[in-house]
Image: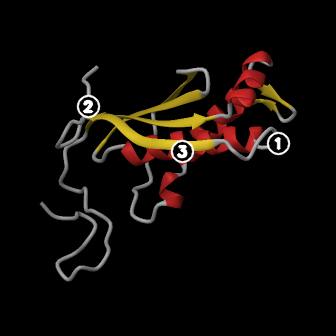
């Protein structure tokens, strides 16, 4: 096992995907946003709308934009023409919002960084839109849930 973004001398490099096969690639990432109980109750009461507007809709737009621009944020990510970027945003407890980002394309490289970036930026957007209610909001557990189509699949199969 070795790090793919280092050359033989240990210097950083972009991975050469020239000889890889073009396959359908998919990744799902998730971020969780935890609210103080009174803030969660207020958000549920207002249907996730705040003074800045529709919180979930804005987070989805921001997350999608971020997923499409991941290569501009993370130095060795390849620029990709993402074919699909979908979000699921729902309360999974009285105080915790789960944000899932699913990204897919047909290409030589995977989209897990795009899914992670999309979920992260969507969570940051929720924080930004809700911070007037509290600075005790916590973004937690940003993680890859599953990926498929590359050399190694991770997580559940769909």
Distance (Cα) linking label 2 and label 3 = 19 Å
> Which of the two discs, 1 and 3, labels the residue nearer the N terminus?
3
Residue 120 locus on image (x, y percent)? 54, 44
- Residue at which label 2 appears: 155
Q: Is residue 22 above or below residue 88?
A: below
- Sequence-first disc among 2 and 3: 3
Q: Which mark is residue 28?
A: none
110 displayed left or right of 37 = left
Q: Nearer the viewer, mark 1 or mark 3?
A: 1
Q: Nearer the viewer, mark 1 or mark 2?
A: 1
At a point 54% along the width and 51% down the height, the residue shown is: 69
Sooner in the amino-acid sequence: mark 1 or mark 2? 1
Q: In which quadrant of the rendered view does residue 102 lie? A: top left
Tell me the CA gap for discs 1 and 3: 20 Å
Kindly identify which residue carries mark 3: 120
Horizontal and vertical percent for residue 72?
A: 53, 59
Number of other residues with Cα within 10 Å of mark 1, as a class: few under 14, some 14 to 19, many 20 or more: few
Q: Residue at x 24, y 23 (%)?
A: 157
Q: Which residue is mark 1?
A: 132
Query: What is the x, y in percent for residue 11?
Result: 28, 80
């Amino acid at each position: 096992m070795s790090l793919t973004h280092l050359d033989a001398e240990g210097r950083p490099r972009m991975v050469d995907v020239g000889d890889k096969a073009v396959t359908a690639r998919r990744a799902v990432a998730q971020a969780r946003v935890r609210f103080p109980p009174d803030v969660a109750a207020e958000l549920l009461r207002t249907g996730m709308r705040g003074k800045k507007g529709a919180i979930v809709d804005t987070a989805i737009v921001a997350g999608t934009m971020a997923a499409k621009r991941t290569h501009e944020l993370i130095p060795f990510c390849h620029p990709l023409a993402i074919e699909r970027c979908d979000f699921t945003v729902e309360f999974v407890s009285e105080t915790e919002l789960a944000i899932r980002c699913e990204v897919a394309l047909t290409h030589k490289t995977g989209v897990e960084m795009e899914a992670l970036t999309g979920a992260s930026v969507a969570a940051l957007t929720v924080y930004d839109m809700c911070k007037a209610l509290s600075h005790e909001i916590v973004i937690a557990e940003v993680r890859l849930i599953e990926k498929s189509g590359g050399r190694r699949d991770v997580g559940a199969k769909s």
